[in-house]
């Protein structure tokens, strides 16, 4: 029997470079909810692990 894995859900992350905002879809792992109801997680962007936090519809790099 195989172990059931949860589906991989890619969420939109807004990356801001030199005044331009770009939206990429990445898998966000280790999502933790803080006391002030904001969510933090980690995502791999360009091979590097970045901390991201939930801001409205999108996630932004911290």
Image (spheres, rainbow, N blue to C red):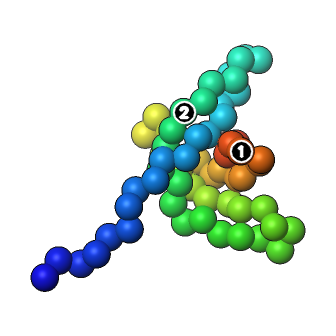
Q: Quarter of the image containing the N terminus?
A: bottom left
- Residue 62 appears in the rendering: no
Q: Give the residue at the far left of this rendering.
A: 1
Residue plotted at (55% across, 66% down): 30
In what element is the residue under mark 2?
strand
Mark 2 to mark 1 CA distance (whole Å):
13 Å
Sequence-wise, the earlier of marks 2 and 1 is 2
Against 61, residue 41 (above or below) is below
Residue found at x 51% / y 38%:
25
Judging by the rendered image, the residue that carries numbered circle 2 is 24
Q: Is residue 1 left or right of residue 23?
A: left
Instruction: Indicate the position of residue 11 as horizontal and vertical percent values.
Output: 55, 46
Residue furthest to the right in view is: 36
Horizontal side of 19 relative to 26 (left or right) equals right
Q: Is residue 18 visible?
A: yes
Which residue does the image show at 69% across and 23% down from the upper left?
21
Q: Residue 58: x and y, percent?
A: 68, 42
Determine the image quadrant of residue 36: bottom right
Residue for badge 1: 57
SS for dot 1 = loop
């Amino acid at each position: 029997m195989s172990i059931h894995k949860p589906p991989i859900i890619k969420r939109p992350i807004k990356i801001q470079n030199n005044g331009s905002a770009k939206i990429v879809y990445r898998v966000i792992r280790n999502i933790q909810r803080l006391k002030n109801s904001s969510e933090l997680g980690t995502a791999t962007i360009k091979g590097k692990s970045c901390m991201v936090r939930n801001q409205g519809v999108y996630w932004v790099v911290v």
